[in-house]
Amino acid sequence: MSFRDKGEEIAAAYLRGKGYKILAGNYNGKGFEIDLIARKERLIAFVEVKRRKSSDFMDPLLSIGKKRKEHMIKGAKVFLLENDLYDKYDVRFDIVTIIGNKENIEHYEDAFRIEK
């Protein structure tokens, strides 16, 4: 399993522990990819997972630029429309960062939102 895939597995387990149900992993299409899509009650969170081997590298939060956010928004719209969920759930974009092992995990809820 790749370092990246293991990071997504760690993040999914972490979110499940917080009461989320994972709806999809590596959801992608033309011009977009979303690492995890999770639901908790009336909320759907589209989650970007960033894993680094150490904190010596750039802050994982700073590595998510405007273009990446646009791709996530595009993917979220496709997912919501394909699954007839648009306007049925609150939508949020989260970021989960993992530095090294799973003990160093941070969940940034509501990192940004989509305007409906």
Image (spheres, helix red, strand yellow):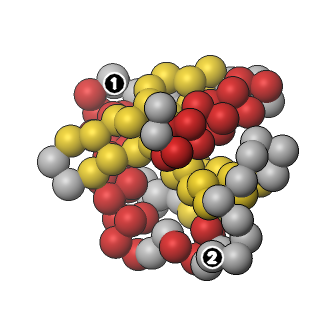
Give the number of the disc on residue 57.
2
How many C-alpha atoms fall within 10 Å of the one at disc 2: few (<14), some, or many (≥20)?
A: few
Disc 1 is placed on an element classified as loop
Give the number of the disc on residue 84.
1
Disc 2 is placed on an element classified as loop
Nearer-N-terminus badge (2/1): 2
Q: Position of residue 65 (x, y in %)?
A: 45, 75
Residue sitting at 76 percent across and 42 percent down?
A: 102
Residue sitting at 61 percent across and 78 percent down?
A: 58
Residue 21 seen = yes
Q: How many marks?
A: 2
Asked if the residue at tag 1 contacts the one at tag 2, i.e. Cβ–Cβ closer than 8 Å, the answer is: no
Q: Nearer the viewer, mark 2 or mark 1?
A: 2
- Left or right of 15? Residue 3 is left
Q: Position of residue 101 (x, y in %)?
A: 75, 46
How many C-alpha atoms fall within 10 Å of the one at disc 1: few (<14), some, or many (≥20)?
A: few
Q: Quadrant of the C terminus?
A: bottom left
What amino acid is labelled 1 in the image? Asp
What amino acid is labelled 2 in the image? Phe
Occupied quadrant, residue 66: bottom left
Choose between 44 and 88: the one closer to the eye. Answer: 44
Residue 90 seen = no
- Left or right of 52? Residue 26 is left
Residue 91, above or below 13: below
Give the number of the disc on residue 114.
none
- Left or right of 74? Residue 108 is right
Residue sitting at 71 percent across and 57 percent down?
A: 99
Residue sitting at 57 percent across and 56 percent down?
A: 50
